[in-house]
Image: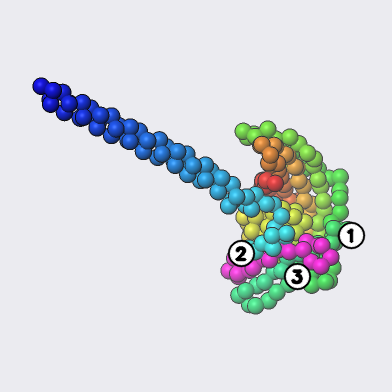
Amino acid sequence: MNKILNLINEMFKSTITTISNRHKIIKQCIATSICLAMIVTVIPSKVFAGENESNLYSQNATENINIEGINYTYKYYYDSKGQRSILITDTTNSVSNILTYNEKNSTFYLDNEKLGEVKTVSENDPQLNNSNILSKLNWKLQGTYHNKISWSKGTTVAVVAGAIAVYLATLGAAGVLAAMGSGALSVLASNAIGGTLHRTLYRATTGSKQNYKYNWSFVSSTNQRFGTYTYQYTV
């Protein structure tokens, strides 16, 4: 009888030890999972942080665009004078041009020759002001801007897209093309010598980040309206 009791006791101790060991293993697994979760949570914020940068020029960003069957490469950078510049290369025909915007005198230059200029005007765009900006974010109006942009007659579609982009600063030529379409830009390039760029700027704060939204439209010198378009960026 005593042997049976001793055997039962040993079996009981063995079971308790096994449960205890399993409990330790489970605790270790949970702790490891928590650590991994913390690592996975932290890494993406570092990997994707650069995607929130709005300045194409400080990043020396590059865009590849097809306009009317011709391939273009746009390279954004600041020149030696700190001016926003775009190297526009027609890779189909191996032709390059440099578009520069001098912010001090509000002038565009194409290969160091004056292309056009920007002037602040009092003209308004009522349709832009009435644009719907409903969103989950609490957008607050920061200001409205109306600027007349001119360029030389016969300017190419690629350069017109670049001129609007280099002035907007935070939107590349690909964004301008996606918003307006090559057809509208072709009309501007062939029939107009510029137009008025209307913009309304909003800001919303989420945590430590500042979100900006532009509603914008373009009215050509021949009084054709294009828009309303919207783009956002975060800093």
Assign a secondary structure to mark 3: strand
Q: Is residue 188 visible?
A: no
The stretch in magenta equals 64-84
> In the rendered image, which residue does mark 1 sit on?
105
Residue 161 rendering spot, x and y as whole percentages: 70, 61
Which residue is painted at 65% across and 72% down in the image? 90
Where 217 sits versus 116, above or below? Answer: above
Contact between marks 2 and 1 (CB within 8 A): the answer is: no
The amino acid beneath tag 1 is: Asn
The answer to whether residue 24 is left or right of residue 220 is: left
Compare marks 3 and 2 and give the one earlier in the sequence.
Answer: 2
Using the rendered view, name the quadrant where residue 70 is placed: bottom right
Which residue is painted at 35% across and 33% down in the image? 23
Name the disc covering residue 65, or none. 2
Foreground: 119 or 173?
Answer: 173
Magenta stretch secondary structure, dominant: strand
Which image quarter holds the N terminus? Answer: top left
Assign a secondary structure to mark 2: strand
> In the rendered image, which residue does mark 3 sit on?
98
Judge whether residue 74 is colored magenta.
Answer: yes
The amino acid beneath tag 3 is: Ile
Residue 155 rendering spot, x and y as whole percentages: 75, 67
Compare marks 1 and 3 and give the one earlier in the sequence.
Answer: 3
Distance, label 3 to label 2, CA atoms, is 16 Å
Distance, label 1 to label 3, CA atoms, is 18 Å
